[in-house]
Amino acid sequence: MSNISSALYSIANNKCPRCHQGNFFENNNPYVLSKFDKMHKKCSVCNEDFERETGFYYGAMFVSYAVTVIFGISLFLLMCVLLNFDAVTFIIVFAILQILLMPVFYRTSRLLWINVFVRYRLPKIN
């Protein structure tokens, strides 16, 4: 279980990076393909703006690339070095997994990117 004040909590649970209570994406399931990329405009709890500026999530593309490279290297080490599979099998498995995990990588990269710029703050008690 992750600490609620950790950025990992926000990323793993699709939560607002500011309050860690409201949802970031409209649907928690990344495999509802008609809505996997739909984000709320603002947090329903703390009113944090998720559409910060035009092109803000362009940087998430580079995060997605890094996540994909790390995944590919890890899969290569597992399959080719430890389990002794050949390169063709690795390429086929990697391509299939990359297609299947694309919605997860897309969402994770956006959540990672906004968590770089927005820090958790304890909710104000009135």
Image (spheres, helix red, strand yellow):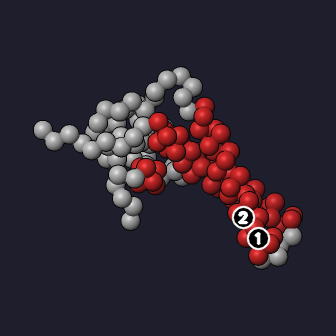
Disc on res. 75: 2
Q: Separation of disc 2 and disc 1 at Cα?
A: 6 Å
Between 41 and 47, the residue placed more toward the observer is 47
Looking at the picture, how far across and down is residue 107, in whole percent?
53, 46
| Screen quadrant of the C terminus | top left
Residue 69 in sight from this viewpoint: yes
Residue 16, quarter of the rendered image: top left
Q: Residues within 10 Å of mark 1 (few under 14, many from 20)?
A: some
The residue at 74%/59% (across/down) is 73
Looking at the picture, how far across and down is residue 108, in whole percent?
54, 48
- Say which element carries label 1: helix
Q: Amino acid at mark 2?
A: Leu
Between 62 and 93, the residue placed more toward the observer is 62
Between 92 and 42, the residue placed more toward the observer is 42
Q: Residues within 10 Å of mark 2 (few under 14, many from 20)?
A: some
Q: In this picture, is 51 found above or below 124?
A: above
Residue closest to the far left = 126
Label pair 2/1, CB-CB below 8 angstroms = yes
Q: In this picture, is 78 found above or below 54?
A: below
Q: In this picture, is 84 found above or below 100?
A: below
- Residue pointed to by mark 1: 79
